Amino acid sequence: MLAESCGSWPTVTVLGLDHDGKPVADLFMDSMAGGWRARSYEDGIETGGIMCTPRGQSPTVERTEHDLPMLYLFRRELEDSGGAGEYRSGVGGEIAWKPHNVGGPEALDIPLELTLTSFGVAFPPVQGINGGLPPNSNRYQISEDTDVADRLAEGRIPEDISEFGDANVLPPKYEMQ
């Protein structure tokens, strides 16, 4: 027996100008690295993908940075995100990135626009089985006016989201520039 799957699907749409000044409109596909559901006899698969899209894949960090005006700070499995129970779902992912080279070589003052949509942010829409608890829900956070650029220039790579300063947790549906 398998627990329910696709408990959430965060979608981030990116609109703006890339590092060459060309328009870009793309979906940020890191959400394809969700944990697979638990079974009644075994844990789920860590960041195995989205069960309802069996051939869906997260692109490599390098591919995304090439295609979009952004720089990853980290992309990794999120510790303890697999739920609770004798057999838990696979852990999901955690990413942090910053806009980078937005607006082309002249660094035009054109903002990067993000549209965040999802289900499974306000509360997990799936249940565990055989006494297992539901999985974590998604969370979008944004930190503004950080010293991340200075840290990177000094060769220091942030390891935890708390290092970015105050982070605002965004509502389940949000649009920003």
Image (cartoon, rainbow, N blue to C red):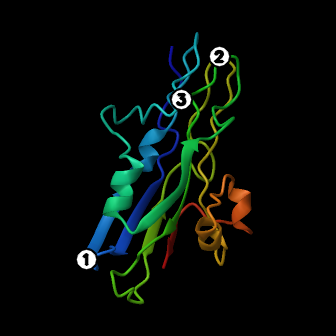
Position of 56 relative to 62 (above/below): above
Q: Residue furthest front?
A: 154
Q: Which residue is mark 3?
A: 46
Q: Which residue is mark 1?
A: 22
Percent of width and height locating residue 74: 56, 52
Q: Residue furthest top?
A: 41
Q: Residue 154 or 138: which is nearer the viewer?
A: 154
In front: label 2 or label 3:
3
The residue at the point 48 percent across, 32 percent down is 5
Q: CA distance from mark 2 to mark 3?
A: 20 Å
User: How many neighbours does mark 1 have within 10 angstroms: few (below 14), some (14-19), or many (20 or more)?
Assistant: few
Q: Amino acid at mark 1?
A: Lys
Q: Amino acid at mark 3?
A: Glu
Q: Amino acid at mark 2?
A: Asn
| Helix, strand or loop at mark 2 | loop
Position of 128 relative to 151 (above/below): above
Q: Which residue is mark 2?
A: 130
The residue at the point 43 percent across, 35 percent down is 49
Query: Residues at badges 2 and 3 in contact (C-beta under 8 Å)?
Result: no
Give the mark, 2 or 3, whose residue is nearer the N terminus. 3
User: How many neighbours does mark 3 have within 10 angstroms: few (below 14), some (14-19), or many (20 or more)?
Assistant: many
| Helix, strand or loop at mark 3 | loop
Percent of width and height locating residue 54: 33, 31
Q: Is residue 86 left or right of residue 112?
A: right
